[in-house]
Each structure stands twice: as structure tokens, then as C-alpha cells.
Image (tube, rainbow, N blue to C red):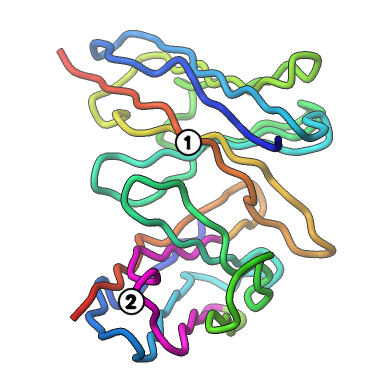
Amino acid sequence: EVVLTQSPGTLSLSPGERATLSCRASQSVSSSYLAWYQQKPGQTPRLLIYGASRRATGIPDRFSGSGSGTDFTLTISRLEPEDFAVYYCYQHGGSTWTFGQGTKVEIK
Amino acid sequence: QVQLVESGGGGVQPGRSLRLSCAASGFTFSTFGMHWVRQAPGKGLEWVAGIWHDEREEYYADFVKGRFIIFRDNSKSTLYLQMNSLRVEDAAVYYCTRDRWEGYEKFFDLWGRGTLVSVSS
């Protein structure tokens, strides 16, 4: 089973700053099956990025994804107030689907 | 309106059973794989189980194998999760989610609001 490890656990930044979130897989995963989700308190997860780098419909271009193999990154170029949330990476491989433990982006 | 609506959650004692339902609307349910994902209070997302669009294959996380059963009724556009031998650690919000293909990419694109399951004596 693929384990996804996200870092850091918490990122304290100010609006306007750049956020870089990491997702490392315990073994190589297909970029086609790597996605990122945003979740705010009391809300359901929202798809941001799929296929490692493709933005989902309606997602602002300040969100970008990159990476391959075992190392993937979600970048928020300039944090807006509504971007402070928890972010999860996700992968599907074979007969398992897994999420990372999440990175919380909080206001500094 | 494209949506998923879960129901069936509630409070149960350890060892008891509960059946969750997820009613789909606004899309052709029978053409999508479906999954259950859970989230314990204050914790992260955890995949639980998935089923192919035509029910030919089911998949389970190790921690629910032998206890939970995922199934669907395409004629009713409804997904189910039969949860048996519930444990305290199964307490969570259970989300129903749709498996989507976009070209070669695959991801969960549509989520219900979730139904809360509490397990305690």
C-alpha cells in the first residue's frame, strides 16, 4: 500500500505570501492518479488539482501542481484570505486509494 | 442538480451494525465508480471502500475488510455501506464520493455532505 506523507504539518504564512506544500509517496505513483484537495472547517473536500498538475474547473491560477514519481508539490503563488485551509494529496494505485495526512495552512 | 446525499448515520454501540445510504441525482449513476471516505473528528481523510460502476469489483481498506460491505443499486441510483461489528475507532463522518475519469486522469470529483457515525457504549 502506498503511503503519502505530507510536509509540513502546518504552514504559518501571511496573505500574499507563497505556499509550497509537499507530498511524498512511499513508492512511485502515477501522475495521472495524483490529486490535491482543499478542505475548510465544516466543509467537504474540494478538488484543486488532478493529474498532478491540471487545475480543476473554476480553480484560480494561483494554484499549481507539479512533480512525478514519489515527489509532488502544490504551490499557492500568493495566498488569499480564503486559501487558509487544510490541503490533502491523494493517489490511486491498483486496488487502493490513499490520502496524505494533510497540511494546514494557517494565518501567521 | 448534480449531487450526492448521504443518510443513515447515527449513534450505535460497539459490535452493532449500521447501513449508510448515498442517493445520487443529476448524473448517470450507473456509469461511475463510487467510494466511501471517512473523517474522524479533527482528523484527516481516510478511504474506506470503493465499487465499480457495474458492481463487478469491490475494494476495501484493510481496517474494514471482513466487517464492511459496499454495494449499490443502479436502478435506484443509490450507494450503500453496510457496517458490521462497529468499533469505537469507526466513529467518523462518512462521505460518499464519485470516481471520475478525465482523459487518462482519475480522481474523486463530487462529494456528499457526509453522515456522522458515532460508536460508543
Residue type at numbered disc 1: Arg
Can you tell which mark lies on residue B113? 1
Q: Quadrant of residue B57?
A: top right
Decide: is A81 above or below B38.
Answer: below
Can you tell which mark lies on residue A7? 2
Residue type at numbered disc 2: Ser
Q: Residue at x 34, y 45 (%)?
A: A42
Q: Residue at x 26, y 85 (%)?
A: A14
The front one of B18 and B28 is B28
Of circles 1 and 2, the one toward us is 1
**Start and end of the magenta stretch?**
A70-90
Q: Are marks 1 and 2 in contact (CB under 8 Å)?
A: no
Chain letter for mark 1, please. Answer: B
Q: Position of residue B79 (x, y in %)?
A: 64, 23
Q: Quadrant of residue B83?
A: top left
The reply to the same-chain question for discs 1 and 2 is no
- Is residue A87 within the magenta segment? yes
